[in-house]
Image (spheres, helix red, strand yellow):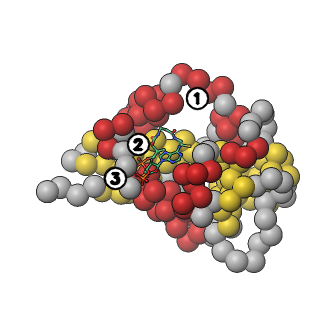
Amino acid sequence: MTEILYRPETSQDDAAINSLTDQAFGPGRYAKAAERLREGNHRLLSLSIVATLDGRLLGSVRMWPIQVGGAAAVFLGPIAVDAASRKLGIGQTLVALACTAARKAGWNHVLLVGDAPYFSRMGFCPAPSVTMPGPVDQRRVLSLRLRTGPSDLAGQARV
Ligand SMILES: CC(C)(COP(=O)(O)OP(=O)(O)OC[C@H]1O[C@@H](n2cnc3c(N)ncnc32)[C@H](O)[C@@H]1OP(=O)(O)O)[C@@H](O)C(=O)NCCC(=O)NCCS
């Protein structure tokens, strides 16, 4: 049986990722506060991970460089897994691989806006001192510290 392949995103994955993400989130995704941290930004391809099976895209997570207060951080999202391939651990593996790659590349923090019951499984905690550039349910603003030492993220998140 063929195994799921996890690898960094390349520019050739763009169309398939956009299609998968559109299916997962619908057209409203561009109205979200999180999108303010992606527009005019460039994704970090080496930290953004895709899952494929026989060349077909099953899942994707994207990572973006941002600033929070005076600190550099990575913004995670969107994450999407093909509807027929969910609950197999693909989402969790994508997040783990992206965060490990970010730590190895020297980043200290990952920030995201998402469901705490899901991302707390991967170690994410509420980030009450981070302000998003748009309306958001503050309970969904979560962060993960990638190494001991740096203080928690605090301040305005911006590109
Ligand atoms: C969220 C998503 C990426 C998870 O992908 P996945 O590959 O199915 O995730 P995993 O297999 O690692 O984890 C599945 C588990 O997480 C749970 N889970 C999935 N989404 C959840 C959520 N939003 N809140 C709480 N738990 C969630 C599942 O019920 C499952 O639980 P189980 O292990 O007890 O059966 C996928 O459901 C998806 O693409 N959803 C649409 C896009 C989306 O909402 N993305 C952002 C999420 S905040």
10 Å crowding of disc 1: few (<14), some (14-19), many (20+): some
Left-right relation of 59 to 144: left
**Residue at mark 1: C-beta within 8 A of ligand 1:** no
> What is the crowding at mark 3: few (fewer than 14 residues within 10 Å), some, or many (at least 20)?
few
Q: Is residue 128 left or right of residue 59?
A: right
Which residue appears at 23% of the width and 58% of the height? 3
- First in sequence: mark 3 or mark 2? 2
Farthest front residue in view: 117
Q: Nearer the viewer, residue 125 or 60?
A: 125
Q: Which mark is residue 81?
A: 2
Quadrant the N terminus occupies: bottom left
Q: Is residue 59 visible?
A: yes
Give the alpha-carbon distance from disc 3 to disc 1, as whole Å: 24 Å
**Residue 119 disc label:** none
**Is disc 3's CB within 8 Å of ligand 1?**
yes
Mark 2 surroundings: few (<14), some (14-19) or many (≥20) residues within 10 A: many
Give the residue pinned by disc 3.
Answer: 88
Is the CB atom of the residue marked by disc 2 within 8 angstroms of ligand 1's nearest atom? yes
Callouts 3 and 2 close, C-beta under 8 Å: no
Amino acid at the residue labelled 2: Val
Q: Is residue 57 visible?
A: no
Q: Amino acid at mark 1?
A: Arg
Horizontal and vertical percent for residue 135?
77, 33
Instruction: Answer whether labels 3 and 1 touch (C-beta < 8 Å).
Output: no
On the image, numbered disc 1 is attached to which residue? Answer: 29
The residue depicted at 42 percent of the width and 37 percent of the height is: 17
- Pick whichever of labels 2 and 1 is earlier in the sequence: 1
